[in-house]
């Protein structure tokens, strides 16, 4: 591993910023303090700052030379509505809010890269440092794009990365094509006719009907889509009735759908409504069907994925970079940026959790877990990767 010495020397400074952000988590579109810290830090380093994109998002700009080429580097800033179980010194100071996904670390890694790039500028072109709000369900990437992100700050390509617990600390993984799935929500309201539970024949039972719909939906996965097309339908909610001896008038089920391609998503959405409506009709009930598409699939462009893999291998060695990592059914709103520009999203290993200080929670160091903490030892790895990515992408002709 060939880390940049100056970035290693600044590790304590960047770690302090990371832990300060961890101690003061802010939820989606509320990242005012975090954005203030980022903007003040960038300004102190002589970096041009633009605020107000996607409400609380900001972009730092570093220019050098005469080339018109450009690159975008993205980090997310928001926390989760979760009560932290850790009791170490940099634990969350706000009840019910926690950096349980490592966005504090992502922000710090990009700041570490920004510090070095601003001081040395060993590139020819423009670097756009994209600090994004509201990745956790708010679609902050989409909102920054709507506010003119790529019109105001053109990027030939855009790159981002997410820490990944369970992968060896400082290793990398990505792949060309789909890396993460689309995220979608559905709700099916089943309306029937209530009756006494001892005399169900006097009504049209929406609970029984909804139960048949739950089972029938899985037939879409096994019989409608191609077996080689990955997809998940998970019913996670089933609500009905208030009394044990009454068949209610209404029941509803809800859940999530995940796919790696939009054509498969189109098929599933269409068939879900058709199947639910047909089952309801068979039992003399009606349905109200709603389907919300949250995040599209995160699809890496082949050339940029190969470029990122090459940079990572030069940094940490071939054996520490997986170029065909197994995609995950988790979702990520960096996908919106990849719909607009070519680019690549990577995973950087966060280790198994042994890095956590005394006072950590008894749970595993997994994402969205109250015992999670970002591994500060990978901060210089991520920062160096971003720097090497810029210097290679914007190498002088």
Image: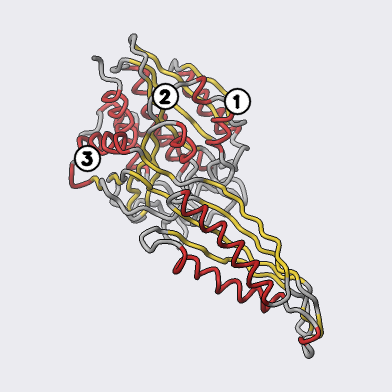
Mark 3 element type: helix
Residue 93: x, y in percent? 58, 45
Quadrant of the rendering where the N terminus is positioned:
top left
Q: Which mark is residue 155?
A: 2
Give the farthest residue toward the top: 66
Mark 1 element type: strand
Which of disc 3 and disc 1 is earlier in sequence? 1
**Quarter assignment of residue 354:** bottom left
* In this view, 191 is above or below 167: below
Disc 3 to disc 2, C-alpha distance: 26 Å
**Image check: 122 left or right of 23?**
left
Q: Which residue is drawn at 25% across and 28% down?
A: 5
* In this view, 257 is above or below 109: below
Disc 1 to disc 2, C-alpha distance: 19 Å
Q: Which residue is drawn at 39% across and 54% down?
A: 328
Give the farthest residue toward the left: 318
Q: Mark 3 points at which residue?
A: 316
Q: Is residue 359 visible?
A: no
């Amino acid at each position: 591993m060939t880390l940049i010495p100056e970035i290693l020397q600044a590790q304590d400074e960047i770690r302090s910023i990371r832990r300060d952000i961890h101690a003061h988590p802010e939820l989606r579109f509320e990242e005012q303090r975090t954005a203030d810290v980022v903007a003040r830090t960038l300004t102190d380093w002589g970096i041009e700052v633009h605020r107000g994109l996607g409400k609380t998002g900001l972009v730092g700009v570093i220019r050098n030379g005469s080339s018109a080429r450009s690159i975008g580097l993205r980090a997310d800033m928001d926390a989760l509505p979760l009560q932290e179980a850790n009791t170490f010194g940099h634990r969350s100071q706000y009840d019910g809010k926690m950096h349980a996904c490592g966005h504090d670390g992502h922000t710090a890694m990009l700041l570490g890269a920004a510090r070095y790039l601003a001081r040395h500028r060993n590139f020819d072109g423009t670097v756009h440092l994209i600090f994004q709000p509201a990745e956790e369900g708010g679609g902050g990437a989409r909102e920054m794009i709507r506010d003119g992100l790529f019109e105001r700050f053109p990027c030939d390509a855009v790159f981002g990365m997410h820490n990944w617990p369970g992968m060896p600390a400082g290793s990398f993984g990505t792949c060309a094509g789909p890396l993460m799935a689309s995220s979608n929500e559905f709700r099916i309201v089943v309306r029937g006719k209530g009756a006494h539970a001892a005399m169900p024949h006097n009504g049209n039972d929406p609970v029984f009907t909804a139960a048949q719909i739950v089972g029938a939906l899985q037939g879409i996965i096994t019989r409608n889509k191609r077996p080689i097309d990955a997809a998940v339908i998970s019913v996670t909610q089933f609500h009905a009735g208030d009394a044990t001896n009454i068949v209610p008038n209404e029941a509803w089920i809800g859940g999530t759908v995940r796919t790696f391609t939009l054509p498969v998503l189109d098929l599933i959405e269409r068939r879900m409504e058709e199947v639910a409506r047909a089952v309801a009709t068979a039992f003399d009930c009606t349905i109200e069907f709603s389907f919300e598409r949250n995040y599209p699939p995160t699809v890496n462009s082949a050339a940029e994925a190969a470029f990122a893999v090459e940079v990572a291998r030069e940094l940490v060695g071939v054996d520490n970079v997986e170029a065909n990592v197994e995609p995950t059914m988790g979702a990520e709103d960096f996908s919106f940026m990849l719909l607009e520009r070519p680019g690549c999203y990577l995973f950087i290993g966060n280790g198994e959790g042994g890095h956590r200080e005394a006072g950590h929670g008894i749970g595993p160091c997994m994402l969205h877990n109250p015992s999670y903490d970002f591994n500060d030892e990978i901060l210089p790895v991520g920062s160096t990767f971003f720097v090497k990515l810029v210097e290679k992408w914007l190498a002088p002709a």
